[in-house]
Amino acid sequence: MIYELFQFLGDVPGARLMTYISFRAIVAGVMGLCISIWVGRWFIELLKRKNISETQRDEKVDPFNVAKKGVPTMGGVVIIAAMLIPTLLMGKLSNVYLILMLITTLILGALGFADDYIKTFRGNKDGLNGWVKIAGQIILGLIVGLTLRYSPEAVMNERVTSHIENNITVFEKTPEVKSTRTTIPFVKEHNFNYADMFSFLGETNKYKAGWIFFVILTILVVAAVSNGANLNDGMDGMCAGNSAIIGVALIVLAYISGNVVFSDYFDVMYIPGSEELVVFMASFVGALIGFLWWNGFPAQVFMGDTGSLTIGGIIGVCAVIIHKELLLPILCGIFLMESVSVILQTQVYKFAKKKGKCMRVWKRAPLHDHYRTSMEQVLRNDPTCKVLFQGRGPLQHESKIVLRFCIITLILAAVAILTLKIR
């Protein structure tokens, strides 16, 4: 709104600053941080007065002695507010990519809120039906994928080159086109077109098949990253800390994609308009860092599914928009690891149960809980249970586990950015 206002007013003091994406992004990030801290205090007090708190994690019913009953939940509302307000004030609201990020926030925020509401107010520990969540993620993936396919504003210049002419750097861009081209890591010619996988269908049909594949991939990315972030939200500051680091990496990647100079330097697609994602992601990072003020150990509020589902969806959609979705297995390696640990644990347990045995891969899943769970706790439920990876050494405090996971994410984020030059 402020951006649009300055554009309307024209040549007034300070108007030029609003044309700099870096200025608007920094302001949005600081605003998100301040709003998250200020609203967080008020929200926590409100939740305590209304007795809206965690009811599932109690040592009397939890076999792993996770005793955090009574801590206010649904703090994701604070994160969403701290993202939306700076974005609406500092962003270019007519930008198609910014609109997609706002839609993502609202759809997944509503799904997460419904899940938390059912758990908290109706006492149903299962929350929203899993198929409803999946349906919401599919709908969001379709909206994003089809918008990138059919919106006239969602175009890219597949290649940018430069040369010196009269001591001036001149940039030459290929025509703006609709493309399923994406970036793949560790490969010299790392701009790959999904349509090329369907060359056997003929020149015309391969592009249609490429877009169908791209839309399906978008749905999978949204669902996978959203659920991965949800699984990662199991310790104080874990999801917020990891996501803030990932958000910073996406700011760098979005800035590169929306800047003709850096697109040429890193030899990636130039996506006009994607620089507005820098503003959104800056508010995203600011909101998460501000939330850590209250969510760091010992947590005074939990984000709930309202926060975690939304956070994961935002990360996935942002990566898809800038065509860096294939970097997500590296960038979101922690989320991937958490998801794989749950899948392995579930499948091995079910397979062993059919044979009348009890077997686990880890002492507990998701993986972060494995490091704070003892074999005594596992055997307390079933003395015959076998754990494939029992681990060695003393159990770790959750604050140390969170710190180490964030360090791993920081390393992975650096590697993801470096893949643009390491080929």
Image: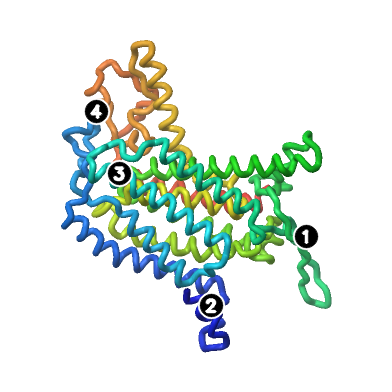
Residue, x 70% and y 54% (percent of image)? 178
Residue, x 34% and y 11% (percent of image)? 356
In this rendering, the answer to whether 2 lies above or below 399 is: below
Disc 3: CA contacts within 10 A as few (<14), some (14-19) or many (>=20): many
Q: Distance between the residues labelled 4 and 3?
A: 16 Å
Residue, x 31% and y 65% (percent of image)? 37
In this rendering, the answer to whether 362 lies above or below 240 is: above
Q: Is residue 179 left or right of residue 232?
A: right
* Precedes in sequence: disc 2 or disc 1: 2
Which picture quadrant has residue 275? bottom right
Q: Which residue has dot 2 on it?
A: 18
Residue, x 55% and y 71% (percent of image)? 21
Q: How far apart are marks 1 and 3 (CA)?
A: 51 Å
**In the drawing, what numbered circle is on residue 174?**
1
In the structure shown, which secondary structural element does the residue marked by tag 1 occupy?
Answer: loop
- Across and down, in percent, residue 302 comes to 29, 50
**In the drawing, what numbered circle is on residue 398?**
3
In the structure shown, which secondary structural element does the residue marked by tag 4 occupy?
Answer: helix
Q: Which of marks 1 and 4 is in front?
A: 1
- The amino acid sitting under disc 2 is Met
Q: Which residue has dot 4 on it?
A: 377
Q: How far apart are marks 2 and 4 (CA)?
A: 57 Å
